[in-house]
Image (spheres, rainbow, N blue to C red):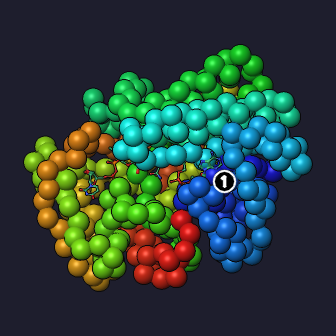
């Protein structure tokens, strides 16, 4: 299929671009490079052997999107573009609503005008808020607690209204749990600017010596070892989930919301030990106070993805750590996201 990937130069979009290209789809990466870099184009070509088409554009630029969709005859859009840092969204909420909500409306308007009515949307487990039961299935009530999560839920609702208004729309909202890991080539991965907010990139930077030690946010949670438990999912499994979702959209109209997780939770201390084993490096840490807004445990019920998309996560925690290490300790970690 001819696919437009907004935010396709970013962490998840670039891995999805690899999987989709290797599955025979033609991808166009539409990105404003606000959190990625041009060097990605050459890295993707090195991995797949196919130079990806890149358009430097903002999703709020409806004219440019309309032109791009028409020019490339895009049959479906995977909408990764957006801002994604929870803490930052509390400081600059307007930027989050403008990029994530206004950007999505602009994209949907362009799609409607050119007649492209199929979308896979990057949503987040963040929309569930504090889990009321585990594992978290799609029937779990939503309970957003920050502007970032609210933008994701609002876009899901816009998409739902759209699908109800016109049966031609085909929409899958994927609620990601905690994406980690990198492509096995070590060429692409997650390389956040500044001090990382998330656990895995932080651990990786401690292991490389870039940061001195990890602060473990709380060891008095009601979990097996007292530290937080999350559903870490390999980004290549996540990328394959998008290929499955695109396949699903070929056959089915309507609106779906689907978790992408493994169903398995790992604690912060388990992550540290697994990373030490994969890298052969020590990861010094100290126990620090809980981070406000964190829940004790959060992991998915991935049953709907298995049933509807015929997809399950296959890669192990050791693979998540080994590929992260390969990326951070090699050439990949010194360049783009
Ligand atoms: P990322 O920042 O690496 O990638 C996002 C890409 O979108 C970047 O390349 C950025 O330059 C681009 N972008 C941002 N605003 C844009 C705009 N207005 N117009 C065009 N391009 C724009 O993030 P990621 O981790 O790859 O996340 C992709 C999507 O998945 C995001 O929507 C994010 O909210 C969602 N998500 C991510 C995670 C995670 O932990 N990484 C978890 C749940 C959901
Ligand atoms: C965070 C975001 C969430 C987003 C997710 C995706 C918050 C409150 N939530 O969730 O919206 O969808 O990332 O990647 O920011 N930890 C440490 N030390 C650190 C960093 C993290 O101990 O330096 C712990 C956390 O307390 C948590 C676990 O590691 O228990 C995972 O943290 P993180 O990677 O930030 O993910 P989430 O908290 O799940």
Choose between 187 and 30: the one closer to the eye. Answer: 30
* 164 on left or right of 330: right
Q: Is residue 170 placed above or below 78 in the rendered structure?
A: above
Residue 102 at x, y percent in the picture: 62, 32
The residue closer to the viewer here, 281 or 94, is 94
The residue located at (64%, 44%) in the rendering is: 79
Residue 152 in sight in this render: no
**Image position of 46 (left or right of 304):** right
Q: Which residue occupies 47% across, 66% down?
A: 191
Label 1, residues with CA under 10 Å away: few <14, some 14-19, many ≥20: some
Q: Position of residue 167 (x, y in %)?
A: 74, 21
Number of callouts: 1
Q: Secondary structure at mark 1?
A: loop
Expressed as whole percent of the image width and height from the top left, the position of residue 321 reads 38, 70
Classify 313 as above or below 211.
Answer: above
Residue 235 makes an appearance in the image: yes
Q: Residue furthest left?
A: 220
Say which of 194 and 115 sits in front.
194
Q: Is mark 1 within 8 Å of ligand 1?
A: yes
Q: Which residue is mark 1?
A: 32
């Amino acid at each position: 299929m001819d696919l437009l990937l907004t935010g396709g130069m970013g962490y998840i979009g670039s891995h999805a671009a690899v999987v989709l290209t290797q599955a025979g789809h033609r991808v166009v990466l539409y990105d404003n490079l606000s959190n990625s870099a041009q060097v990605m184009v050459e890295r993707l070509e090195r991995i797949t052997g196919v130079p990806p088409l890149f358009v430097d554009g903002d999703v709020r630029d409806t004219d440019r999107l309309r032109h791009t969709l028409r020019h490339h005859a895009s049959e479906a859009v995977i909408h990764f573009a957006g801002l994604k840092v929870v803490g930052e969204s509390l400081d600059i909420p307007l930027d989050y609503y403008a990029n994530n909500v206004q950007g999505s409306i602009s994209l949907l308007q362009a799609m409607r005008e050119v007649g492209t009515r199929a979308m896979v949307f990057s949503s987040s487990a963040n929309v569930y808020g504090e889990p009321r039961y585990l594992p978290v299935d799609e029937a779990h009530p939503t309970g957003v607690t920050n502007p970032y999560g609210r933008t994701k839920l609002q876009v899901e609702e816009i998409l739902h209204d759209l699908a109800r208004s016109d049966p031609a729309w085909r929409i899958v909202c994927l609620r990601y749990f905690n994406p980690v890991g990198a492509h096995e080539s070590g060429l692409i991965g997650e390389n956040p600017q500044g001090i990382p907010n998330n656990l895995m990139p932080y651990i990786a930077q401690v292991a490389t010596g870039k940061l001195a030690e990890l602060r473990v946010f709380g060891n008095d949670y009601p979990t097996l070892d007292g530290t937080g438990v999350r559903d870490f999912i390999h980004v290549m499994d996540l990328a394959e989930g998008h290929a499955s979702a695109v396949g699903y959209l070929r056959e089915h109209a309507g609106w779906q919301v689907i978790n992408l997780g493994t169903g398995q939770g790992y604690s912060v201390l388990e992550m540290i030990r697994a990373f030490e084993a994969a890298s052969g490096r020590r990861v010094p840490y100290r126990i620090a106070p809980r981070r406000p807004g964190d829940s004790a445990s959060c992991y998915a019920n991935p049953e709907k993805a298995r049933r509807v998309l015929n997809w399950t996560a296959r890669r192990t925690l050791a693979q998540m750590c080994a590929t992260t290490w390969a990326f951070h300790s090699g050439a990949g970690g010194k360049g783009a996201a």
